[in-house]
Amino acid sequence: MVDQKSASTREWKRLVDEFQKKSDRAVAILGTTYLNTHLARLLECFIIDDEKISKMLLGEENPLGSFEARIKAAYGLGLISRTEYHDLVLIWHIRNRFIRDMGEGSFSEMDIQNLCKRLKIPDEVILQEETPSPRGLFVFGTAILAQQLMYRANEAAQEKRSLRDNFILVNIE
């Protein structure tokens, strides 16, 4: 467990360091891509062990292939908390703003700033005397969520679904 925690911390630091070198648009798109990958792993850890079914559900063009669908499925299956769901949905909206903007896009745009300020996780963790930028809130929230999703995937593996017994019409016992 200690190795997993230190690996998670290293991953978090690597993500934050990598984001420091990127444009706002790249941060928004890469951050959500990163979270999308972790959501896929979370769902994969929970569903039955069947590679074909996993690909049919989680493949990019399949029912649980989009970031939005994975967020909703993880929440609907009870794999993430209400706060995590809230922040993932906000991050999805932020990403969509950057994708729709054919220019570079910026965390200084008022609507993006407002979305970033609504993130709950950074608000719960960041000290009151700190006033991070909207980009800082986004990066921090993404990093914390990624770390949390790794933890949730390990929990989901403990609750992994298994195939049911063969169909029986009537149980005579």
Image (cartoon, helix red, strand yellow):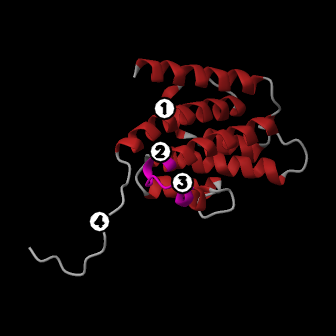
Going by the picture, which residue comes out furthest to the right? 103
User: Quick one: SS at disc 2?
Assistant: helix
Q: Answer with left or right where residue 76 lies relative to residue 88.
A: left
First along the sequence among labels 1 and 4: 1
Which residues are the magenta region? 44-54
* Amino acid under disc 1: Glu
Q: Nearer the viewer, mark 1 or mark 4?
A: 4
User: Quick one: SS at disc 4?
Assistant: loop
Q: Find disc 1 in the rendering and name its residue.
A: 124
Distance between the Cα atoms at labels 1 and 4? 44 Å
Q: Nearer the viewer, mark 1 or mark 3?
A: 3
On the image, the x and y values in percent for residue 26 come to 80, 37
Q: Nearer the viewer, residue 122 or 78?
A: 78
Secondary structure mostly taken by the magenta-highlighted segment of the chain: helix
Q: Find disc 3 in the rendering and name its residue.
A: 51
* Amino acid under disc 2: Thr
Q: Find disc 4 in the rendering and name its residue.
A: 165
On the image, the x and y values in percent for residue 143 come to 60, 31
Q: Nearer the viewer, mark 2 or mark 1?
A: 2
Q: Answer with left or right where residue 9 lies relative to residue 104.
A: left
On the image, the x and y values in percent for residue 74 come to 49, 52
Q: Is residue 132 above or below residue 142?
A: above
Distance between the Cα atoms at labels 4 and 3? 19 Å
User: Which disc number belongs to residue 83?
Assistant: 2
* Amino acid under disc 3: Glu
First along the sequence among labels 2 and 3: 3
Q: Residue at left 62%, top 43%?
A: 37
**CB contact under 8 Å: marks 2 and 1:** yes
